[in-house]
Image (cartoon, rainbow, N blue to C red):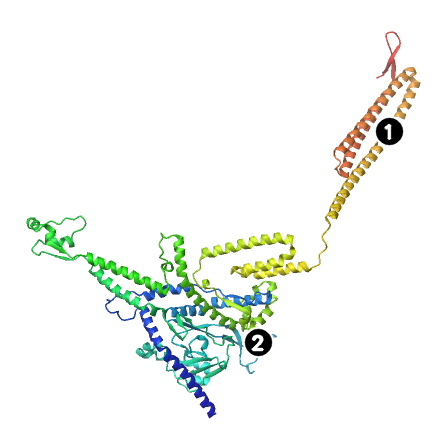
Amino acid sequence: MAKESKSSQAEVQKWLGAIRAYDKEFEPWARRVEKILKRYKDERRQTAGAEVGSRFNILWSNVQTLVPATFARLPQPDVTRRFSDRDPVGRVASLILERALDYEIQHYTDYRATLRADIFDRFLGGRGTAWARYEPHSRSASLQQPIDGTQVSEDEVTPAAEEVLDYECAPVDYVHWRDFGHTVARTWEEVTAVWRKVYMSRAACVERFGKKGEKIPLDASPEDLKQALRENPELAEQQRAAVYEIWDKSKKEALWLSKSMKEILDRKDDPLNLEGFFPCPRPLYATLTNDSLIPTPDFALYQDQADELDLLSGRIDGLVRALKVVGCYDGAMPSEIARIFTEAANTDLIPVKNWAAFAEKQGLKGSIDIVDLAPIAAALGTAYEAMEQIKGQVHEITGIADIVRGVTQASETATAQQIKGQYVGLRMRDMQKAVAEFATELLRLKAQIIAGFDAETLTAIAAIDQLPEPDKALVPQALAMLADSPLRNFRIEIAADSLVQLDEQEEKESRVEFLGAVSGYLKQTAEAAQVVPQLVPLMVELLKFGVTAFKVGRTVEGVIDQALEQYKQAIATPQPPPPNPEMVKIEAQTALERERMQAEGQREAAKLQASQAEAAAKIAADKEIAQIKIASERDIRMHEIQTGAVSKELSHRREMQMKGRDQDMQAGLKREQGERQAAEQKDQAQTGAQQGETIAEAMAEFAQAMRQFAQAQQALAVAMGAPRKLVRGPDGRAAGMEVVK
C-alpha cells in the first residue's frame, strides 16, 4: 500500500513538473497576450505624446473584420466514403453520420460558440483550443403498476429505480488560452500529452470523484476573476477547485489530479477510443515556426504601426483643436470689431460710431490681425495622408484590403475589383482554409464519438425513418460499419467557403449550372442508350462522377444508384426476342384482311336477309294477287252470264284494268327493290339491325299498298255486283251499262 502511495505521489510530481515546464515556456507569450487584450478593450495606458481620447484602435477594427470574414455561419458537414467504389452500405452509413453531425451542430449551441471563441483567440492571442467529450444523460425508470391491474401493497418492498439511458450527445468545450497546456515540443506531432484546467465546485467534485472530491481544496479561480474575488469577499462561495485533466498518449490513458493533493484523483484507459487519442484537435494557430509551438500574435507584427497611428491620432486631434479663427485687434478702436466675429450673421453689417478714426486705421486691415491657418491646415492634411499610409501598411501585414471592408470605389470597373479580390484572396483564403481545417478536425472528433452512440439514438437524431425504403434495408449494416473505425472508412470535410457569408446569387447560378449540365448529359445519354444499351452503366457512373462535384448533387447519388440497379435488373431478366418486322407486317395485313372479310360477311348476310325478305314479300303479294284475280274472274263469269255480250266486254275491260294494275304493282315493286339496292350500295357500312329496320319499313309500305289495292278491288266488286241497265246510243245500239241507283 505504501509503495502504491509513493508511486502515485511520484506520478503526480512528474505531471506537475511537466505543467510547470509548460508554464515557464509560455509565460512570455501569456504576458504579451494580456497586453494585447487590454489594448483590444482599450484599457492600456496612453502612448507617449498622445492626448486623451486621441487613440486609434486598429486592433479592434481588424479583429472585428477578420472574425466574420472567416466564420459567418455554421459549416455544412460533408461525409463521404473514403473511396469512390460502388458501396451502397457505405453510402448509407456516410449519410447517417452526416445527418447526425448536422443535428448536433444545429441543435446544440456548443459547437457554434466554441468555434467562434477559438477564432477570436486566434486573431488576438494567436491560439484557439477546444475539447471534445462524451456526455450521456440517464433517467430513472420507475416501476409501474402491473399491466393486469394488480395493486402493489405498501408493505411490499419497492426496488430502487433503475437508471436507463435517455439520450446521448458529443459536446465540444471552449478551453481558455490560459487553461490549456501540453508537453513542451517543437511541433504538434511531437506532443505526447495534453491537458486542460477545469474549475469545479464542491458538488461537482463529489459527483465526479466521490470521497476524494470532498478533500480537494477550493483554492483556485479563473485568472480573469481573481481581482473581483479579492475585492468582493461576498463572492467567496465562487471559489473553485482547479483539476487538471491529462491525456497521456504514450500510455493511452487519461488521469485527473490537483496541485493541492498528492494523489491521482481518477484514471481511465483510453476513455473515448479516438483514432488520434487526443480529445482536442490541433490548436488553431496564428504564426508558427518549426522550432516552437509558441505562436506569434498578429498584432505583434504591426504593433509599431499601431503606435504610430496612436501618435498621429493625437497630433491630428491637436491640429483640429488649433484649426480655428483667432487673432487680436486694437483696443483703442471701437468695440464693433469684436462684434463682427461674435454677433454678425450672414450678410449682416455692423455700424461703427467713429468711422473717421476707423477709416484712418485702414479699416479692418489696420485694426485686426488673424492667425494664419494655412500652415495648420497643411500640417493636418499631411497627418491624414501619413495616417492613411500607415493604415495601408497594416492592411498589407494583416491581409485586409478595401475589397474585404466593402469600401471599393463605385467608379472602379468590374475587372479592377476582380483583380483586387484575387490579390486579397490569397491571404484570406489561407486564413479561411486554416479555420476550416480546425473546424473539420473538431467535427471528426464529434463524428467518432457519435459513431459509438446507441442505435436508438442514431435513429432519432439522424431521422433514419425518413430515408427511402431501399436505404432503410441497409441501415443495420451501415450502423455496424460506423462502429468499426469510422475515420478509416469515411472522409469528413468542411469546405472553407461553407463558413463564410453565403452569396445567394452565386448559389443560384451554381444550381442553374448544375441543372443545365445534368439535363444536357441526360439527353445525350438517352440518345446513346438507344443505339448502344451496353454503355448505360458506364454513362451512369460518369454521371455520378460529375454530380458529386457539386455539393447539392451528392444528395441524389442514392437515387442514381437505385436507377442503375433497376436498369441492371431489367437487363438481367430474360426478355422475349424482338419481333421480326416482316412478321409484324404480315400479321398486321392479316388482321386488316380479317376485319375486311368480317365486314364483307356482315354485308353479304344483310344482303341475303334482305333478299329473303323481299322474296317472301313478293310471294305473298303474288299469292294475294292470284286470289284477287281468281275472285275477279269468278265475278266476271257470273256477270257475263247475266249480262251476255256486254258483260264480256266489261269483263275484258276489267281484266285489262287488272293487268294494268298488276303491271303498276310489279313496276312499283321493282322500283322499290331498285331503291333498296341503291340504298344498300350507298351505305354498305350499316349494321344488320339497321338494314332489318329498312326492310321492315319497306314491307310496311308494301302491306299498306296491298291494303289499298284490296280496298279498291272490294269497291270494284261492289260496283260490279250492283244492278245495271243497258244504255243504248242514238242509233239504238248498246253503248254501255249503267248502275241502277
Q: Compare residues 271 and 542 and report the one nearer the observer.
A: 542
Amino acid type assigned to the residue bearing label 1 in the image: Asp
Q: Nearer the viewer, mark 1 or mark 2?
A: 1
In which quadrant will I find the C terminus? top right
**Residue 690 on image: x %, y %:** 75, 37
Label 2 is placed on what type of residue?
Gln
The residue wearing badge 2 is: 145
Distance from Cα at disc 1 to Cα at disc 2:
107 Å
In this view, which residue lies farthest toward the right? Answer: 641
Tell me: residue 59, above or below residue 669: below
On residue 622, which mark appears? 1
Residue lying farthest top? 731
- Residue 28 shown left or right of residue 110 in the figure: left
- Side (left or right) of 585 relative to 488: right
Q: Look at 88% across and 21% down and name the residue there.
A: 655
Tag count: 2
Percent across and percent down for residue 596 are 76, 41
**The disc label shown at residue 269, or none:** none
Residue drawn at the location 89% of the way across and 9% of the way down: 733
Residue 461 can be seen in this image: no
In this orientation, which residue lies closer to the viewer: 63 or 158? 63
Residue 179 picture quarter: bottom left
Residue 476 is left or right of residue 653, and the answer is left
Neighbourhood count class around disc 1 (C-alpha, 10 Å): few under 14, some 14–19, many 20 upward: some
